[in-house]
Image (cartoon, rainbow, N blue to C red):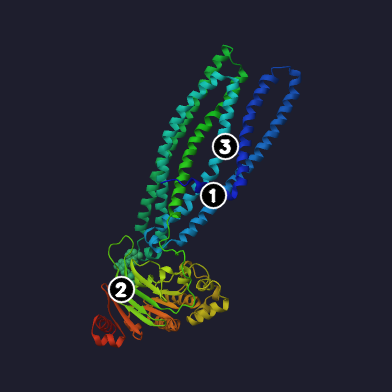
Amino acid sequence: MHFPVKKFFSYYKPYLKIFLCVLLCALLVSSVTLVFPLLVRYITKDVLEGNLSDALSEVYWIGGLMLVLAVIQNIANYFLDYKGHEVGALMERDLRSELFAHMQKLSFSFYDKERTGQLMSRVTTDLLMLAELYHHGPEDYVKYLTRFVGAFVILFFINAPLTIAVFCFLPFLGAFALYFNKKLNRSFKENKERIADVNAQVEDSLSGIRAVQSFANEHLEIEKFSRENNRFLDSRRNTYKGEAYFYNGVETFIQLITIAVIVFGSASIVSQKLDLADLITFLLYINFMIEPIQKLTHMTTQFQEGITGFQRFIEIMNLKPAIENKPYAVILSDVDGDVEFHHVSFRYEDHTEYVLKGLSLHVKPGEYVALVGPSGAGKTTLCSLIPRFYDVTCGNVFLDGVDVRDIELHSLRKTIGIVQQDVYLFAGTVMENIRYGNPEATDEEVIAAAKHANAHDFIMSLPNGYHSEIGQRGVKLSGGQKQRLSIARVFLKNPPVLILDEATSALDNESESIIKESLESLAKGRTTIVIAHRLSTIRNAERIIMLTENGIAEQGTHDMLLKRGGVYAHLYSKQFELQA
Ligand code: ADP
Ligand code: MG
């Protein structure tokens, strides 16, 4: 993949000033550390070997200077640690918000394919790595490059031949480090994939915990989880092994170089080419030259990790939502609710089978039609084409005569209310959940909507009334109660077009009759498409449409269809017998 360099650096922009200060601090800290060994050398060589009577006061002066330098260094270091990490965290926050906002726009077809747990991994761990790179990367380069160049220059002036000898060792160290680094990178990537799998497993299993426990299948979940968990362990074990090799290899190199310096340095003292103070200085500086090589290679790892994180981030950011506004999309107002399917064919992405084939259907404003037929016939799919959860493969869907693909998406979706069999409620209060239908609604409007939905009485009997918490996904409520909240939500939204998709199918008879009443009042004055498998519930529809796998088989009123003696009549008598 081509790496988007410009985009990568653009995230620094809001924090450029503070970040440059951070880099300046890194430069300062490194420069000060370079001065210390020089001062030691000055004391051992020039002060203590000169006139000893003046020495003491000079040592005090140098001690004082060291103290000042130490204070400066620590203040700079404090700023570096604190602000550097803060900039990293701020950038991480920005990236995470941007990613989340983008994910909010991605279409149903994207979520049909992806696992939520995997996606969560992207929002969390991947971006964490990226943030590390964003602040530590430049900081460490400045720090270690300064040390390396500084130490090299200083040592060169003290003793050129020895410095060059040490310098010649370094490419070997570099080559060794790079070789291991490649290996390590592979295992880091593997780690990231494994932890994403673990996350996906946790998410999947915990959101289905009720199904798990009702099937008493905890042991299966535990087994599946420990498989993923152990795969993650294996991958980490590999990484640690690689790291242990790497760091100890580097350590051995450092020891070899140090030993060599001690031996050859001492030999040079014997042959009077070097004095003791210089050898000590050398030993003090030697790490300054070696450490950066070790760190810089470690940083290529960090770099790799961050870059992979950024690429995974960009991969999602580059996904265009399958459903988007056209440049000159129409904003609908005063919708009558005329819905027309015109030769609509549809198949789901990556599927070859068509769910709908050349289907045409016209629902007039305010009409109440029922869509019936065997499960899998495509009733839900057909309805999901109106709010553009998916786009038609061929043909058109018109709302008030405008192709839905030409309508601004928000204004389109505001005109359509959907009540489904499974209700999605958010953790929060009753009030917040109903207000989801219209965030601007006042408390009074929320309560009025609840009354319309026959929900007010049960809400008032909850411990905190409208301010009662309903638990994650509304677990503290019964099916019928949840459904009434979702109906109140749609009352508040007040859309001209209404889709009732098996809204009462999951309910018992008593809840069904309460809810039927509120659904009927909700449907008043709106174009309504009701999908039901219990045919008794839609007997009074103005028009019943029988959808089978081969398209619309027949349509008409209940009486007409019964008289016709076709699929509908057959299905109806079968259900009637069951009930009798
Ligand atoms: P109905 O509501 O009439 O029971 P659906 O519209 O839910 O039928 O489904 C029609 C067909 O489309 C079924 O064969 C189903 O398996 C398939 N289908 C439904 N949703 C999806 C999806 N998100 N991705 C792929 N296939 C789907
Ligand atoms: Mg369905």
Residue 69, image x and y in percent? 68, 34
Is the CB–ligand 1 distance for label 2 below 8 Å? no
Which residue type carries mark 2?
Answer: Leu
Q: Residues within 10 Å of mark 3 (few under 14, many from 20)?
A: some
According to the picture, the residue beneath numbered tag 2 turns out to be: 359
First in sequence: mark 1 or mark 3?
A: 1
Give the distance between the C-alpha atoms of the residues marked 2 and 1, in whole angstroms.
49 Å
Q: Is residue 371 visible?
A: yes
Mark 2 and mark 3 residues within 8 Å of each other at the beta carbon: no
According to the picture, the residue beneath numbered tag 3 turns out to be: 142
Above or below, comparing residue 311 to residue 549 in the picture: above
Of helix, strand and loop, which one carries label 1?
loop
Location of residue 53 (image quadrant): top right
Residue 155, image x and y in percent? 58, 23
Q: Residue at horizontal 49%, vertical 23%?
A: 168
Residue positioned most to the top: 271
Q: Is residue 61 left or right of residue 225?
A: right
Residue 463, image x and y in percent? 54, 75
Above or below, comparing residue 14 to residue 271 in the picture: below
Relative depth, front residue between 498 and 119: 498
Q: Residues within 10 Å of mark 2 (few under 14, many from 20)?
A: some
Q: Is residue 478 visible?
A: no
Q: Between tags 2 and 3, which lies in front?
A: 2
Above or below, comparing residue 390 to residue 545 in the picture: above
Q: Between tags 2 and 1, which lies in front?
A: 2
Is the CB–ligand 1 distance for label 1 below 8 Å? no
According to the picture, the residue beneath numbered tag 1 turns out to be: 11
Of helix, strand and loop, which one carries label 3?
helix
Q: Is residue 49 left or right of residue 97?
A: right
